[in-house]
Amino acid sequence: MGSQYYLVASLPRLVLGQRPPFDEDRFLSLCEGVLSPSEQEDVGLALAGLGEDSTTLGHHPFLHGWRRSMIQMRNALACSRAHGKHVDAATCTLEHTGYSGYIQNVAAHAVDAENPRDAEMELDLARWKMVEELLPQDPFDFAVVLAFAVRLRLAWRWARMDETVGRKNVEDMVAARSAVSWSAPSS
């Protein structure tokens, strides 16, 4: 357990929108020999985003709470988008326990955002906050390691974004859709 205290105490402060000091693989290697095999598995799930929308839940209650929050967020986004398009969202929502009015409000506001990047940042800032709400009182609890893993994944998501690459991806997507839309029917 002493090694876990050292690991938690040595974790750097992460800021969404700033490049983290190390990547996910380096974090996994820092956990080797410090955490039990099941704890290492849970860290891997948190880094991969598994447990959010899959049947793989992991062992720790933090991951279960995170999954419930992410399901509610996805449901709230689906309902907000469906409402605007006059579609029944019930066909694309998943059951979950618990409820957060905060999640509902963030999702509704993000759907109304004019800029998709701003909407994504708003959602990730909400995710960042939700991580904090899932933490226990003990600052050295294993959940702190899992919370760091989730935040590391979110931070790297933004650090890997590149405007030039994003613009090219959009242009390629538009070109591909145009080619499909305008292609002549085959005889």
Image (spheres, rainbow, N blue to C red):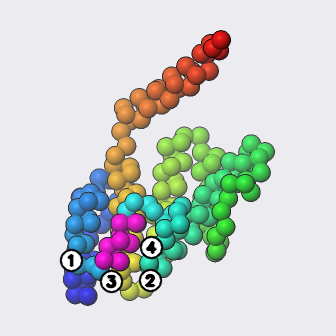
Task: Find out whether the residues at labels 2 and 4 contact each other: C-beta distance under 8 Å.
Answer: no
Secondary structure, mark 3, is loop
Q: Is residue 99 above or below residue 36?
A: above
Q: Position of residue 131 (x, y in %)?
A: 46, 69
Asked if the magenta segment contains residue 42, the reply would be yes
The residue beneath circle 3 is 140
Of residues 44 and 134, which is closer to you in this image?
Answer: 44
Seen at 77% across and 46% down, the residue is 87
Q: Earlier in the sequence, mark 3 or mark 1?
A: 1
The residue beneath circle 1 is 33
Residue type for callout 2: Pro
Seen at 38% across and 49% down, the residue is 158
Q: Earlier in the sequence, mark 2 or mark 4?
A: 4
Seen at 23% across and 79% down, the residue is 34
Q: Earlier in the sequence, mark 3 or mark 4?
A: 4
The residue beneath circle 4 is 58
Residue type for callout 3: Phe
